[in-house]
Amino acid sequence: MKTKALAKQYCHDFIPYIWYGIIVSVVYILFGLLSVVDGQPPIEYQFKENFFLSPYIITIVTMIGISFNYRRFKLAIQSGVSRKTFWKAKMFFIAKATLIVNVVNVIISFINMKLGPSETYLYYQAYGKAFSNVFVQSISMFITDYVVLLFIFVAMNTFGTMTSLMNKIGKSIFYSIGVVCYMFVTNLLTQYSSQRLISRFYAHINGDAIFNFIFSIDAKVPRPYALIGFMIILTIIAALFNLLFTKLEQVKR
Amino acid sequence: MSKIEVKHLAKRFKFANKPLLNEVNFNLEENEIYGLFGENGAGKSTLMSMIADYNRPSAGQVLFDGQEVHENDEALSEIYFMNQDDMYTKKDKVSQIFSFVESMYQDYDVDLQAKLVKEFKLDINQKLNKLSTGYQSIVKIIISLCVPCKFILLDEPTLGLDARNREIFQSNLIETYSENPRTFVISTHIIDEIDRIISHVLLLQYGIIKMNGSIDEVSSKSYSVSGPAEDVNSYVDGVKVLDEEQLGRYKTVHFMDQLPDREVPASVDIEKMKLQKLLVYIMDRGKL
């Protein structure tokens, strides 16, 4: 009872982030249209160019909303639940939130496909010929998107749960280290020696074969089964890490 | 009868010079009203938060009916901690917060909630963050009195409340307690206002429970004797005096002992020492 009630409240608090995502998308499209000068490129073309990014913008904005953990923790602990029940409520909420965001994204994607070629959508780029039946193809697209989005959301929430264990100083240090690591890695990637090292490592672990297997790229008719399975495994791993961090003591702000 | 046992509880914060709580031991029995007192920073809120499993102790344990409270849904559903922090969604309307709490607790007292909303003149259509500090406390008070938990921990419940609303809170606490007895632990600095409500005193100082006893036990041994200085002096002669005040010839003497076995002069008044006076004395001197 408490798990469902908590998840419902979390969803209620999360819904505004979908609106924020839609607002950001609209603003992005409008800014895109501003770049049209003297009808070049044509306004319809520019609109389509920007519109197809809407689901990804909504996903990014909602990812931020999913990541907040401390306020959810406060609500749960105030309501007399254990951390494990809180974690269950979070997972239940993420599953629901993913469904809502996915429905919004799929609707926008269908509009997008009506406006232009279906290949503008990532699923169709990889698995456009997976099923000949449009209905089955749509279901497959929905499930694949859902599973991928579920992993992204669980991973983001796990990240938020981890950072909520830190105070402001801890977070500042953590983010600073992140920025330094990012700069270090990007700098490393520009150097030929490190590129060679990475290529060797990639070849050593047979990276091509792994990615081909996961994305079914080398199959005659690529189907997303392996990707779905792989994402489910990653989601479970992320969820277990989430449980681990949830059980630790939160820092009082 | 349910009870909470606090055993050898200690709390040391990272980078702190000394532990905040050291070897805290006491029991909370069912259907009693406890007053938890202590100076600012004594650790009252931390102690309450550890009982409700908000924070983890550095050592020791909190047991509910012999079972660890930590990660125990059954025990936690019987403990409600009214925190000084904002725990509910600030952007929600008060009515939405009430609905959420109602959905969390099966036997939540909706009728009492409606009565309290009316008495406190609370606008439930306002958003929580738009309310004054006093009314934010009132929202928390209403929830605390309506949740069907056996143990209710109230941390500074009257924070920001005006005299009228403090009166409403006290009268409703007594009323709801009489109708549906459960355990209340009230932490406050306004001791005078709750000494008529509480049945037990817990005094926290220097990380330990300095005083733990029923209000009758504490007040039966503490007296204030006042009257003309010479009469008071002759009456309390030989008694270990805790504190004394003198205004001209009029003197008041406070002590914690049996009354002297001698005739009380007609000019001398004897009354029970006020709890606030006694606690302030103990906190000042650091000893009983």
Image: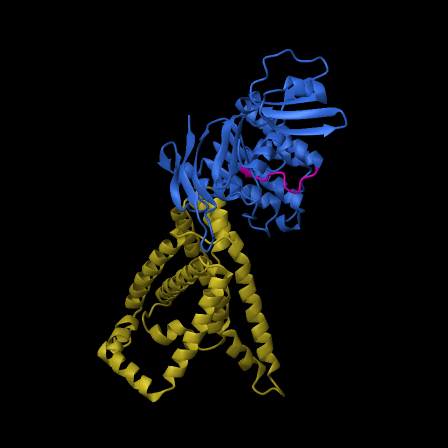
Residue B160 lies in the magenta stretch: yes
B266 to B93, vertically: above or below: above
Image quadrant containing the N terminus of chain A = top left
Question: Which residue is at a point 60% across and 75% down the rendered structure image?
Answer: A30
In the image, residue B110 above or below residue B233: below
Q: Indicate whether A187 appears above or below A136.
A: below
Q: Is residue A99 left or right of residue A17?
A: left
Task: Give the percent coordinates (x, y) of residue B136.
Answer: 63, 44
User: Does the image show residue B168?
Assistant: yes
Q: Answer with left or right where residue B283 lies relative to residue B76.
A: right
Which chain appears yellow?
Answer: A
Q: Is residue A191 above or below residue A239?
A: below
Q: Which residues are magenta?
A: B154-162
Specify whether residue A199 is painted magenta.
Answer: no
Which residue occupies 36% across, 35% down? B67
Question: Chain B appears what colour?
Answer: blue
In this rendered view, identify the residue nearer to me: B280 or B160: B280
**Would residue B71 be seen by someone viewing this image from the given angle?**
no
What residue is shown at x 47% (from left), y 65% (from top)? A105
